[in-house]
Image: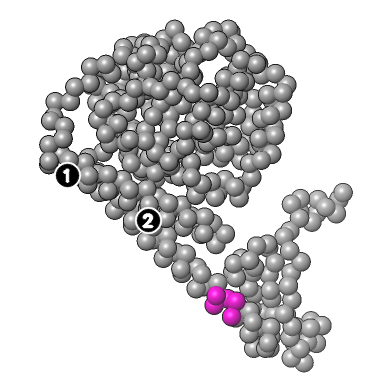
Amino acid sequence: MLLEYQSSTRIGSPPEQDERAARRTLRAQIAKLERDLSEAFVTAYPMGGLDAEPTRSCAAPRLLDLGELERVRDDLAARVRSARATISERADRQAANRVQLERMLLEPGRYRFVRISNRDIGEPGCGVWQVRPRLGLIGMLMGWWQVKLSSGCPLATGRGAAAAD
Amino acid sequence: MSFPKGLIAPELAAEFPGLRLHWTELEARVGTSPRDVRRRLRDLSDRVAGAGVVAMRTQPIPHAYRAFYRQVGLDPDAARIPSEEAAVRRLLQGRFGSRDMLQDALLIALVETGVPVWALDARRVEVDSLGIRAATSGERVGSSREGLSLPAGQLVVADASRVHASLFGEPAPDHAPGPGEQRIVLYAVAVEGVPAIHVEEALWVCTDLLEAG
């Protein structure tokens, strides 16, 4: 019990000290990776969040040995790598969408009916940029195209409910 | 105000120099919370918003607990740290609901400081040997025979004769304070990266609320 702690192993022997130092290093690496993963989580959130990792069974808290700490470290490192790849891929996609939106604004006639949402370019809100013909059918026939930005997020209650009020 | 330190098993103290448990004992009445405590919970509810909860894990104290969870084999994305659990519950329920004076005091301390505090029935605790250690084979949580059987090596909050709770877990039902006036033991668990002043503040907030209530 608590008052009778007497370790059977010899504390302070060189191999044990080495192993303890290794465990300390691994714990520091785990703490750093956890910070990196948290920052990646926050960065990815406005981009749609990170892919859900398979939830492992919740083990009881205990002192991990060297091998277990290495597994935790490697698992975290893989998750950080995957998170960064996801962020990078989404950032590239958003940059490409921003470039396409600029082109749409310059030459709407070349991007007929193309839609790009605010989310696609990493902006908040529900607005959607769309190339539409001016004056409907006449604009289509005459080649009058324009980029329109939708008015924003739908009403929480829906159009029908709002009209009924 | 400084609170007594619990015992940390030597092998744990050597591995986790920042791991510590502080406790305090007080007389308290467990019952319905008064109006000002419920108002304080409402005010706290207003301070918790979705964006803040998402970014919470990058703040120093939640980060310290999350890192420690990983270091002892827990996945904080599956078994959330107490402050994140409270914040997510607030988002799902829309507010911090009042339960009773004791639970409300523990929740207020947790939300205000990020440090979790738990309560035990003082009659069940030998405070002089209260601390954190690894469970031995055949031990159970609580005093009853129906208590959860613990695997050897699981980290627990215990005294010289009984295990009160798994580390970061809720105390055994038969060791938790019941309703009415009684002596209770409050304890807070801190890890490396959690400043002492936050631990003291957490226990102080609880003590203040319970003694006033």
Question: What amino acid type is highlighted by mark number 1?
Answer: Asp
User: To which chain does the residue with label 2 belong?
Assistant: A
Which one is in front, B148 or B38?
B38
Q: Which residues are magenta?
A: A95-99
User: To which chain does the residue with label 1 belong?
Assistant: A
* Relative to B73, residue B154 above or below: above
Crowding near the residue tagged with mark 1, few <14, some 14–19, many ≥20 C-alpha atoms within 10 Å: few
Q: Image check: A76 left or right of A70?
A: right
The disc, 1 or 2, on the residue closer to the chain's N-terminal end is 1
Q: Which residue is mark 1?
A: A18
Q: Helix, strand or loop at disc 2?
A: helix
Q: Quadrant of residue B86?
A: top right
Question: What amino acid type is highlighted by mark number 2?
Answer: Arg
Tag shown at residue A79: 2
* Residue B177 horizontal/vertical position (percent): 50, 13
* Residues at discs 1 and 2 in contact (Cβ within 8 Å): no
Residue A98 among magenta residues: yes
* Residue A102 horizontal/vertical position (percent): 64, 82
Residue drawn where x is 19% and y is 22% of the image: A6
Residue drawn where x is 69% and y is 39% of the image: B46
Residue located farthest toward the right when viewing the structure as drawn:
A165
Q: Quadrant of residue B70?
A: top left
